[in-house]
Image (cartoon, helix red, strand yellow):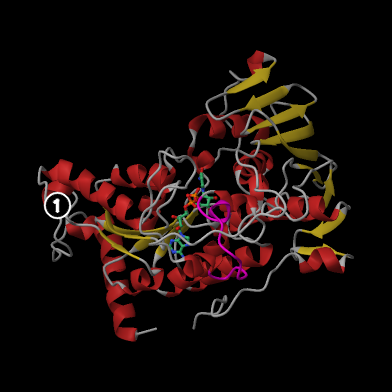
Amino acid sequence: MNTNSAVRRISRRDFLRSSAALGAVAWGMPTIVPSSVFGQNAPSKRINLAIIGAGNQSTVDLPEWLKNDDCQILTICDVNRGSRGYRDDKQFLGREPQRDFVNAFYAKKTGKDSFKGCDACIDFRDVLARKDVDAVAIITPDHWHAVQTIMAAEAGKDIYCQKPLGLTVRDGQEMIKAVRKHKRVLQCGSQWRSTKHVREACELVRNGRLGKLQKIESFVAVNNFAGPGPGWKPEPVPEGFDYNFWLGPAPQAPYHNLRCFYKFRFIRDYSGGQTTNFGHHANGVVRWAIGDDLFPTEFEDAGSEFPEPGDLFTTPTKVSFRARFPGGVELFCHTDKRSFGVRFEGTEGWLELGSKKFETGPATIKSSAIGGKDQRLYVSENHYRNFLDCVKTRQDGVEPVETGHRTSMLCHLGNIAMLLKRKLKFDPLSEKILGDDEAAAMLARPMRAPWSYTTT
Ligand SMILES: NC(=O)c1ccc[n+]([C@@H]2O[C@H](COP(=O)([O-])OP(=O)(O)OC[C@H]3O[C@@H](n4cnc5c(N)ncnc54)[C@H](O)[C@@H]3O)[C@@H](O)[C@H]2O)c1
């Protein structure tokens, strides 16, 4: 690492922190964005953000970042220049359309049509080399999360990384090491811990309002794409798309549109399917409700189904596994038309939670007040805002790297149990699978050169 640039980076970061504590202090204008865009938020108090990955989820995340006057999006990085072929045909995404989206937002805010404050680039290493970038939002497919997080941490950037935290358990472990070694703030982008009704529901479960817990269910969505089936034929790589860079640490493989944009989540080389997609959300809520310190010690397939051998898609078409916590409480994670949600059943009642609300039986549980000696959970009303605040205070947010990793790990272990169709014993302290070498080997995967966990 270049020492001079490190010193300069630390200076700007320290400055952000001290100005958060002391109020406005003069600081040179770092960019061409007029201060009128950011209201009272002088450049000294702004967090300069770079977006890495401008696909489907960026359509949700970008507007959220833009709501914050103390955050300025400086650049959009994506290996795709701009195309259709994402989740649905209406989406035209990639670095240029999303750069234009950001510039149009700032242009409207300033009233200047010619506004060009945000640029676009292909290589995330160029983003990490920029001294004016304080933080990165990683919204790439899962097989990139570890390498990009580790390199960002090494470069001194704070990180908002979309869930899951990596493709494997080893990925998550390496991400923790890098984030803590370089004293970075990382928020895992599973937004449910910043959702009021989820926090309220989890506080009821955590404080025993359901009595002794008997069983837990977590729901994941039905797959919204099907693979091309065995005998599928490679397609030409579209113009403007750096496919080799998209593959990155994943194995070399022929191009097909169903492999890449959005649909990567159904292929094991890049993702864990709906288990780590919706499953990260739902199982993250389960862990919050029962206590993040608890972790299952047994995992078992419960009738999962997979695409035909030879299909491009390789993740479950039907997710179905059981995980047992110490003490015997069982979590049943499965595909369900409710898409996202969790159901808890205890000796005194039940609670079922979805994306908008939760219900209880009896209904009186819902109105039971939490207070006095009850355990309270971290209050965050907005996941993005919580990250920005933590960049300034240098505190952990509502979903720091260890929390995101342990939820991802639960999902990865469910996937391994479903693939092997046998019971796994797991030691949550050492994070090792016991007595099964084949399963243990699936906790990590090789990376294609030149990518690796080691960056320095
Ligand atoms: N929090 C949520 O609710 C939520 C919802 C959807 C997706 N996600 C997560 O967001 C991530 C992205 O999912 P998506 O649906 O947006 O996928 P997507 O395929 O639509 O978009 C990913 C983008 O990343 C780009 N990309 C790939 N490799 C890159 C690289 N090396 N450098 C720069 N850009 C690169 C791709 O070209 C693509 O444009 C996934 O990890 C997913 O789990 C989270």
| Quadrant position of residue 321 | top right
Residue 250 forms part of the magenta stretch: yes
Q: Is residue 176 above or below residue 305?
A: below
The reply, left or right, for residue 298 in relation to residue 163 is: right
Q: Residue furthest top?
A: 363
Residue at 59% x, 42% y is 281
Please tell me whether mark 1 sits on a helix, a strand or a loop.
loop
Closer to us: 27 or 413: 413
Residue hosting label 1: 115
The reply, left or right, for residue 227 in relation to residue 238 is: right
Closer to us: 261 or 41: 261
Residue at 36% x, 52% y is 388
Give the percent coordinates (x, y) of residue 72.
Answer: 26, 54
Residue 408 forms part of the magenta stretch: no
Residue at 84% x, 51% y is 298
The reply, left or right, for residue 374 in relation to residue 49 is: right
Amino acid carrying label 1: it is: Phe
Give the percent coordinates (x, y) of residue 383.
Answer: 44, 44
The magenta-colored residue range is 248-261
